[in-house]
Each structure stands twice: as C-alpha cells, then as structure tokens.
Amino acid sequence: MEHIFIDLTSKNNQFICVEDQGSWLFHRFGKRRIDNEELDFNLLKKYLKKESPKQITLYSILGDPMEYSRILDLLFFCKRSDIVVNINCNGFSKKIKDTLGYDIEYCFKIYGYKNTLDIIVPNADKTLFKNLNLDFKIKPKIQYMLYDHNLCDVKHIIRLSEEKKFTLEIHPGVCVYNNLNHVIDQQGKWLYDIKGVDEYDLDIFYKPFTEFKNLKKIFNSFKQTNYKLSQTNEGWHLLKNYVKDTGISILDASLPNIQSNKSFKKIKCISYKGHIFDNIESFTVVTNAYIPDWTIQKFNTRDSYQKNIFEILSEFSNSEKLSIKSLL
C-alpha cells in the first residue's frame, strides 16, 4: 500500500469556529458535542505492520493530530518502519517542538497572522508564532486561509516563508453563503460576520509558492484597516435557520439503502473511531456525522449538496462498516 490518511483523534487544542468542530450541515452555534476519542495505538500499530504503507498523512476532521496521546510513540514507530509521515495541523500544539528530530513534513493551516489571527480565533494561543519559527528538518508548508480582513497579513506570512524557506499556499477562506461567514465563540455567542475574497478576482489559490516575487506585487498594497466587525442583517437571516439541537449519530441512525452515484478519487482513510474508507469525501462526511447534532428529517434532498451527503451517509449506514479492528 502506498498511502493512508489517518485521523488519530477528535481532541483539538484550539477552537476554530469556521472548521468542522464549530460549523457543519445543521450546526452553527458554538462547539459541537464532540467527545474526546482517539485511535487505539496498539491496534493502529498492528494495522500499519500488516499493510506496510510507504507514507501516512495525519489529518483530523474534528481534532488535531498533535493532540493524539501517543503521537511521539507513533512517530518513533514510523521512523523505525521507514514510513514517511506528513502532518496536517493548526500549528498551536506545544508538542511540535518535541518532534523536530523526526523527518516530518508539516502542513500548517492558519487563519491570519500577527495582526489578524485573533479575528477568527479570539484569544489565540501564541504558541503558533513560536512554532512557525522552529528549525524544522523538512521545511513545512503553510496553508493560509484568506478572508477580506486578513489580506493585510499576507505580506508578513510571505516574509516569514521567504526567510524560513517554507512553501506557501493561499486558499480562499470557507464561506457559508454569498461570500460571508460567521465568527461564533465556543459557547455559541455570535460575535460578528466576516467576508470572503470573491470580489478581488485573485488567481493565486491552491498553488504552492516557493518564489514570492509575484505574490509580493499583489499583497504589498493591502494595508491593515480598522474593521468595524459587526453582526450583519444578511448574517442574521442565515443564522435564524439554525438552533442548538439534539440529533442522532450515524452509528445509531437507520437510513434507507441508497447508493451514491458519485465517484471519488480512491485513497485509504481511517477515522478516529477506526472505520476504514476508500475516499476522503466519505471519510469527511461520516466523521462529521458521528456527532449527534443532525437528524434525517432535516435533509433537503432536492438540494444537490445535501443530497450528496445523505447518499454517503446512507451508503455507510447500510455497509459492513469495515474497521482496522475487523481486519486484524
């Protein structure tokens, strides 16, 4: 086997409301009811010995892989077994400095830099800035999630990437509708809305940059402004459709036996509950649906997005639910 995506844990070290831990299909208000769970290390180790992958990517949907209690043991095992390790994380973990002796390629997904990070991540842990200045054996990649308010910080992240020889990718920040998203704290209080970058017509997204001349020309002109962040009327009309609700987990749901017609790129994925998937899309949808804050009745299958999710959940609900434990 060449490559496996592994979600080690549902535990996170920083609440980021625009990610799946705070925002999914029918949920917007605060941190979702996520129990702290993780893969059994001994089971995972046996599975990796059996499959002998050349490479693994540690990538969490709800949590952060650096919060896995046995992360250093796993890295030691992979080094001894000649398994290449990539880690996609938010960069806040205090454990990152303890991994510098390993040949790990990190990808840090960040939502701003020194002037703007606190807008999406209020009171963000400043360990992120220390970690970005560590001396990595393999130079990391930064995925910078771009919104209107953090355009001014791109020039600073370019400077850091140039000095440290990092690779930089710029991604459009996720919006829920019409170039807009909400910042909602962990307790569910709506703080304000943020804007995406649709109006700027940028042609730089998803490309890995190691030379920054052209990026500098684009972003040096953006200056920090005193944004009046507010709860917008449009934001209120979007949020009035959501309530804090008790629902069901996919592990307890009984769905009709509907097969998805969509085909996805094949890659082996393991969720933090140990279930095995053959594509990232199903892995992501089912992991989100572990959390009991949705119901079957809420789905509008006339909407193509919801229909796709419903079909993936139906397929999983009626499957054998393969797991690493069942294959050992």
Image: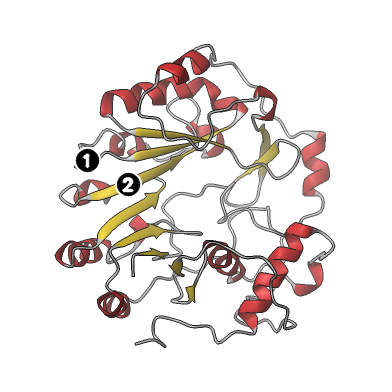
Please tell me which residue lies in front, 251 or 256.
256
Circle 1: element type = loop
In the rendered view, tell whether residue 24 sits above or below residue 299. Answer: above
Residue at 27%, 51% in the rendered image: 95
In the rendered view, tell whether residue 221 sits above or below residue 101. Answer: above
User: Mark 1 or mark 2: which comes first in sequence?
Assistant: 2
Residue at 50%, 59% in the rendered image: 61
Residue at 31%, 78% in the rendered image: 47
Q: Which mark is residue 252?
A: none
Is the residue marked by circle 1 packed among few (<14), some (14-19), or many (20+) residues within 10 Å? many
Three-letter amino acid code at the position of disc 1: Phe
| Residue located beneath label 1 in the image | 136
How far separated are the C-alphas under marks 1 and 2? 9 Å
Residue 15 picture location, percent across and down: 50, 49
Q: Is residue 216 left or right of residue 32?
A: left
The N terminus lies in quadrant = bottom left
| Residue located beneath label 2 in the image | 106
Please tell me which residue lies in front, 277 or 175.
277
Three-letter amino acid code at the position of disc 2: Tyr
Can residue 321 be seen from the camera position used here?
yes
Q: Is residue 249 left or right of residue 108?
A: right
Can residue 91 be seen from the camera position used here?
no
Counting the numbered discs, the total is 2
Residue 263 in which image quadrant: bottom right
In the rendered view, tell whether residue 299 sits above or below residue 144. Answer: below
Q: Is residue 166 left or right of residue 220?
A: left
In the rendered view, tell whether residue 322 sits above or below residue 291. Answer: below
Marks 2 and 1: in contact by CB < 8 Å? yes
Name the colour scheme. Answer: secondary structure
